[in-house]
Image (cartoon, grey):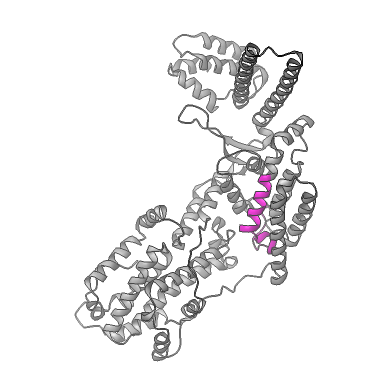
Amino acid sequence: MVNRTWHTVAADNALWKALALSNGWRLPDDVSTATRDIVAKLNRAKAMPGTGSGAWKAWFISALVERVLDGKTERELVAAEDDHHQQTKKKKKKRVNRGFEDTNDAGGEEAEAADDDDEEEEDEEEEDATSYSNNSKVQMASRQVVVSRPIGLDDEPAAEELQGGTVWGILNFLLTEDMPNSDKAIAAFLTTHTLFTESGHVLDLAINFFEGSAHAQASDTFQRLWNKYKGQFTQARVLQMLEKWLAKYPGAFVRRSPFASPANKAAASPAPAAMRKTLDAFLERATAKAASQFEQALARLRDRLGALTATAAAAQCEEPDEGLDDDNSTPEDFEGSDDELLKEYQALDLLKIKTEVLARQLTLIDYELLQGLTHEELLEQRWKRQAKFCPNVRRFVNHFNYISAVVTTSIVLQITDKARAKFIKKWVEVADKCLQLNNISCALDIVSGIGSSPIFRLRKTWSRVSKSLVKRLEGLQAELTRSHSYKRLRDRLFTATPPCVPYLGMYLVDLAFISDGNPHLVQVDWPDHEAGVPCWPYHYMTANAINHGHPYPFTKDEELCRKLLSLKHLSAERRYQLSLLREPREPGRSAPTPSFESC
């Protein structure tokens, strides 16, 4: 096998470097019965002509020989070689500096003795650093994670990328590794961790990492080195994680989730009171023992925990709600007379409200609904599979339908063609302004209402609408089209400057595709993990899709928002009947309509 491989690969030294660093080729794990034979084949291949040459080829084959003899993995050999290379560079630099000092300084015996002491301390420090580096890089199985190490553009190995692992392993990677985008990665873990573990378990592990007991099974030497090189770094990362948890995802500390625990599908999540008690005890211990640089962070955590405790006590939400059927739905279909409803709309006088003011207040309402979507409701398509526990998703959907119904009702209620044309003009302007504010949801609400059948068929009304306004509406419809999997909307959101309110339908479709199209587990051969371990890329993509963005810098007009949300509307059937009443069908003649199509 080895000889055939050497004959078929290109004679390119860069290939050997890539093979060595990417760990792409593995020998059989059980080589005890064939060690001598494999080593002999490797040594013959090393000297074989026409199969590539150079230091990287020689090093790679030598490394494989060493792996066969010592039972190491390629990753360990790469790490060991890297550490050896760095250590050699440091020693060379020290020798050069020492020679320079000897040449320019005749120093006495006391200076030489001091230099010797410094060198011994530096050597000890360097030895400790190398020892810790070897332990942290080499012992991959003990880290309980699966990582990849891709080759960068400069043919050098890039930073390790997390692919999956146990709960302990993922937390160990996020809290102890100096990785890019650590804030984003920690936020992603907090968003999705309830899919594969309990919040109480995560809190206990985070506390263990802060207090240095997470590596209790490791050797005394490793623990000493870990505390020396990773201790305060990890403590800072743990406090950062806890602050983010209490600020952005406080649900676990305030209310019990209605969704089943992954550890016990029949049981709900741990009680918030127990979570708060555990965190409070930890903060008390940490305040007494932690370094002074953590005092402010610990004080902020105590303040946040106190506020959450007061909130939980006031709401009395320690127990899960049964069914959560109260979705705070928008007003039901109006059952009174058309004239009575018309007077209600005339009292609000939508035409006199400035377009920008109306668009901003509608945007603030939509943004609050978006912020109300909890991450738990958006995980693993729960809005479809456990809809009764997703009231905020239903509330957002109901509001979308409500605004569309209000737009249609406000137009068909008007008695004259001219009045209906004025309302069409007003709503087109509001939709255009909402789109400028990146409120895709409300813009689509309004355009859908204008394009509904009761409005679309009003030939006389549309004859009073200017061609420029119709063209403007067609442009909005083209921008908000749902064709090609919302391509135009995606392009707009991708280039938009936050804040934004996306269309919830597209939002949920993306989450469904992520859930259906990506593996949730990584297969490993570790004991007690036969089913696999959580797949980190899946959880990271899900968390990024759930990100709600930045708030709008507008002041909310509580009175106007209350009036907008209390407007009644006609049922779909009555809206169409009223449309027929305003403009009856003409026998034998199809009603000309504008060229735009309904969203």
Determine the main secondary structure of the stretch shown in magenta: helix
Q: Nearer the viewer, residue 468 or 384?
A: 468
Image quarter where the C terminus lies is: bottom left
- Residue furthest toward the left? 588
- The residue that appears at 64% across and 35% down in the rendered structure is 525
Q: How many numbered discs, if any?
A: 0
Q: Position of residue 385 (x, y in %)?
A: 56, 61
469 relative to 38, above or below: below
565 relative to 486, above or below: below
Q: Position of residue 379 (x, y in %)?
A: 56, 56
Residue 382 visible here: yes
96 relative to 411, above or below: above
Q: Nearer the viewer, residue 266 or 276?
A: 276
Residue 245 magenta: yes
Q: Position of residue 478 (x, y in %)?
A: 31, 61
Q: Which residues are magenta?
A: 236-263
Q: Is residue 356 left or right of residue 562?
A: left
- The residue that appears at 55% across and 16% down in the rendered structure is 59
Q: Nearer the viewer, residue 331 or 175?
A: 175
Residue 267 visible here: no
- The residue that appears at 63% across and 13% down in the rendered structure is 104
Residue 582 magenta: no
- The residue that appears at 77% across and 55% down in the rendered structure is 278
Q: Nearer the viewer, residue 244 or 278?
A: 244
